[in-house]
Image (tube, rainbow, N blue to C red):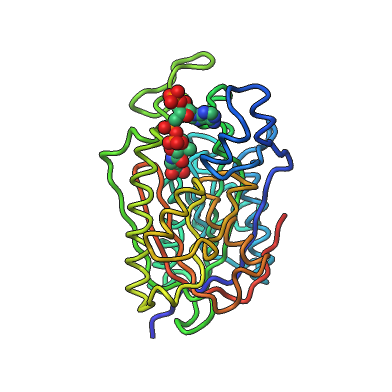
């Protein structure tokens, strides 16, 4: 019988520094009221200089391995768009720091959909029998790529990391990951963009250059995010054989509370069925889904056996969704 991927551990890591809306309003032309009412965000975490995505990823991974009760892993996938260096990937170094030297490890760049993409890869490796235990990490430090003077991005993003362990098991176990769907639309490539620093527009020698910061066409992204997240979540719900009433919790990418409300409304779900970490953490990009899952598990919103839909939309554009039942796990925060 083909093995089924089963989520069996979850860990998180957040930087200590809290940046409130009032902190931002003290130096940018914005207000707590605007940010709260337009996005649902009250505060976010940011790393101090010297702390990189790999550091948060390493800590979250340690938590996930502890939560899973075993440090054994035969594959590491790190979803991020803020790697420690443009080259090489951050995942091999994270793996080495975890004592996993020799294990295949790579970064996956699907922006805010990265965690769902990485979970899909992990699930496929497990289903095919190519891996028995996979560490999936979503980690980002957008404070390192957003312009400190740009209120439209600085107010939204926060830094953080979340990780899960996926093991080979059976489809009827709590934690079993069911249908997964992924998609992309490159015609939207400019809607979320860091223009310079890649091969199309390399940064010349010197300091800050035009195009090095993250930009976003907010309204365009908003519209596509609602459409793609609700459609993909509905797709996996149907493929899982669940009715709308069967769904206990929607864990959507935490981009904007209004987007999550709109996705839930389109799917016929109540706002209380949505996991929400955005108020305290902002948009943590690839980390947002595992961070929201962990918070929902800690609060009791997610319990063993809960039927969960994950859904995300991000730059590229990319999107993806997955259906799973929640396992009996305790999230570990490091
Ligand atoms: O994570 C990847 C996926 N990302 C998303 O899904 C994000 C999707 N988009 C959004 O969440 C929203 O579009 C935003 C929160 C980014 C922006 O909200 P909006 O209601 O769409 O505002 P807008 O971009 O249309 O801007 C309206 C006004 C503009 O001023 P003017 O040009 O009308 O004078 C902005 O400059 O709001 C201004 N604005 C702000 N004002 C105060 C933008 N950001 C701020 C701010 N404080 N922080």
Q: Residue at x 47, y 16 (%)?
A: 209
Report x, y in % for residue 187: 25, 39
In the image, residue 124 sits, relative to residue 211, either above or below, namely: below
* Residue 117 in the figure: left or right of residue 189: right
Report x, y in % for residue 132: 50, 72
Q: Nearer the viewer, residue 293 or 76?
A: 293
* Residue 146 makes an appearance in the image: no
Q: Residue furthest left?
A: 187
Report x, y in % for residue 182: 34, 58
* Residue 25 makes an appearance in the image: yes
* Residue 15 in the figure: left or right of residue 53: right
Q: Where, by quadrant of the figure, is residue 125 drawn?
A: bottom left
Q: Residue at x 54, y 75 (%)?
A: 306
Q: Residue at x 60, y 35 (%)?
A: 33
Callout count? 0
Q: Where, by quadrant of the figure, is residue 4 drawn?
A: bottom left
Q: Quadrant of the N terminus?
A: bottom left
In the image, residue 31 sits, relative to residue 297, either above or below, namely: above
Q: Residue furthest top?
A: 206
Q: Nearer the viewer, residue 175 or 38?
A: 38
Report x, y in % for residue 20: 68, 36
Q: Nearer the viewer, residue 72 or 284?
A: 284
Q: Residue at x 42, y 53 (%)?
A: 262
Q: Quadrant of the C terminus?
A: bottom right
In the image, residue 303 sits, relative to residue 94, either above or below, namely: below
């Amino acid at each position: 019988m083909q093995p089924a991927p089963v989520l069996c551990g979850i860990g998180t890591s957040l930087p200590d520094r809290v940046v409130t809306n009032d902190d931002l309003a003290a130096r940018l032309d914005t207000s707590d009221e605007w940010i709260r009412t337009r996005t649902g965000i009250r505060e976010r975490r940011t790393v101090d200089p010297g702390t990189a995505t790999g550091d948060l990823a390493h800590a979250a991974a340690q938590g996930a391995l502890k939560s899973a009760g075993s440090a054994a892993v035969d594959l590491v996938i790190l979803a991020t768009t803020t790697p420690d260096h443009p080259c090489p990937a951050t995942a091999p170094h994270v793996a080495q720091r975890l004592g996993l030297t020799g294990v295949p490890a790579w970064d996956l760049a699907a922006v805010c959909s990265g965690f769902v993409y990485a979970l899909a890869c992990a699930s496929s490796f497990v289903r095919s029998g190519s891996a028995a235990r996979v560490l999936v990490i979503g980690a980002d430090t957008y404070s390192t790529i957003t312009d400190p003077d740009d209120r439209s991005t600085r107010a939204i993003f926060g830094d953080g990391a979340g990780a899960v362990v996926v093991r080979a098991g059976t489809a009827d176990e709590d934690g079993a990951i069911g249908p997964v769907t992924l998609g992309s639309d490159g015609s939207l490539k400019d809607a979320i963009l860091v223009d310079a620093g890649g091969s199309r527009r390399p940064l010349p020698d010197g300091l800050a250059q035009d195009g090095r910061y993250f930009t976003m066409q907010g309204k365009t992204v908003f519209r596509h995010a609602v459409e793609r997240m609700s459609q993909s979540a509905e797709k996996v719900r149907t493929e899982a054989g669940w009715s709308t009433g069967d769904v206990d919790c929607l864990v959507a990418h935490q981009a904007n509370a209004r987007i999550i409300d709109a996705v839930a409304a389109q799917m016929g779900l109540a706002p209380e069925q949505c996991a929400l970490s955005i108020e305290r953490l902002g948009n943590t990009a690839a980390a947002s889904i595992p961070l929201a899952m962990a918070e929902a598990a800690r609060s009791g919103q997610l319990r063993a056996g809960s039927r969960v839909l994950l859904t995300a939309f991000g730059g590229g554009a990319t999107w993806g969704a997955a259906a799973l039942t929640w396992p009996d796990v305790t999230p570990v925060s490091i």
